[in-house]
Image (spheres, rainbow, N blue to C red):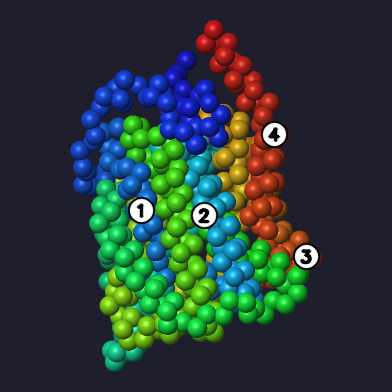
Amino acid sequence: MQEWFSVVAADKPFQEVLMNPAPRSVLSDTQKSEPAPMPQSFDAHGVEPIPESGRDSSPRDQWWIWVGANVAPINWVLGALGITLGLTLVETLIVISVGNIVGCAVFGLFNMVGHRTGVNQMVLGRAAFGRKGAIIPGVMQGLLTMGWVGVNTWVVLDLAVALLGKIGIHGGEGLKYAVAAVVMAAQLGLAAFGFYAIRTFERWTVPATVLVMAVMTVLSLTQADLSWTTGTAENGADKLTAVTQLLTAIGIGWGISWVPYSADYSRFVPARYSGKSVFWSTALGMYVPTVWLAALGACLASTGQGGDPSELVIGAFGVMALPVLLLIMHGPVATNILNLYSCALAALSVGVRAARWKVTLVAGAVASVVLVVFMQSHSFAESFDHWMTSILVWISPWAAVMLTEFFILRRGRLDVSQLYSEQGPAWRWRALVALAAGIVAAWAWQYGLVPFMQGPLARGMHNTDFSWLSGAVVAGGLHYLLTRQQHRSTRAKHAATDE
């Protein structure tokens, strides 16, 4: 029988493994004695498992990667959304802080799987959906990442051009497209070079950006006249609606929206590091900057300056914001290099046959077209909310199926070789049925900004948005019910073989 690769320690409940480092017995003698891998430069890896010699990362690197991805102006807008929806500043801060505990914890769990297997996220999906069935979420992920590149780059343009105008530099549409070209070239170059360049970029640039962001936060809060208890949602029903919509956009929904990326980066962490260290470094790397910047955006929005990112920054800093924003522009670049890298891996996972860096360049070209579309948008808040609610419709059911598959049905054990074998099932229809049902359930209880994205449950229950919850419960529960007997039979067969 092929050797089973333990995603979590085989003899311990998952909750115990989460709170305690993996026992040394989980690692082979080779893994224990193997020296730390030498630093790498160009990432030639595709979607095959990363060998120990290529694992040039650490939990600390993972922390900086995810902090860098979330120290970005886009999170100001997300925090401001709570004020826009009618919540008070206090209510907004509570929803953001508590909601992200759940979303970021789920994100950390998925990073543990990538660390234990050395496999990227979309290939891991083959365990649940089959070799060909995993193409469906792979295509969705590829489209998602290219769209995010457009969104995040647009935020940079809005900030940069507005502030350049404040100091007398005007260039109309020409200036905006010139800035876009420079930003796109920088992030595309880093993403094409691959993980090792991304890791190094984040490791050395994020600490300085965080320091500047800390100074910026102190200055903005000392200058702003915060309104803690003023909100337009006066009755209980209106508040509940606002809370659910905020949870979807920046509470629980934000951490879940990053789940399809997770293993793409944690797969580079050597096996000598414990799963606990990977979980906490990634979960907190997501939680701290997300809550921090969203809270800052909510505070600035409570002063009555609206939710537009350029207005928030200009209102707090004026012309003196320029040197700060030159560093803050790092945030979207740090985010987009992850989008472009994961986009290429998603394409390779669904069967595209080309070098990863070539696929990255193609993805960048498509993302540039998306950027042009977003540059024509006159309401960033509406565009973003539209986008976020639409992607959670498939991510939350997909994540629930994956969590159920790995941690409940497979009990933390996975035969990695089967993910690449032609002998395994091409389609796992029961999982796909569960995913489809979850997507329908999520759509039924989502409240988007266009009629098509306003499900019947959402409309019938005062425009609430529990899409992430309804989709996850239906998909995860149905997947368990449809496949539990099959997994029991498989475990019994392997137990008999071992004897």
On-image quarter of the C terminus: top right
What SS does tag 3 mark? loop
Residue denoted by label 3: 461
Q: In front here: 129 or 179? A: 179
What SS does tag 1 mark? helix
Q: Which amino acid does label 1 sit on?
A: Ile
Q: Which amino acid does label 4 sit on?
A: Leu
- Per the model, the C-alpha gap separating discs 3 and 2 is 25 Å
Q: Earlier in the sequence, mark 4 or mark 1?
A: 1
Q: What residue type is labelled 2?
A: Gly
Residue denoted by label 4: 482
What SS does tag 2 mark? helix
Q: In front here: 361 or 109? A: 109
Name the spot of residue 452 as percent of width and height, x first: 68, 67
Residue denoted by label 1: 65
Where, by quadrant of the figure, is residue 91 drawn?
bottom right
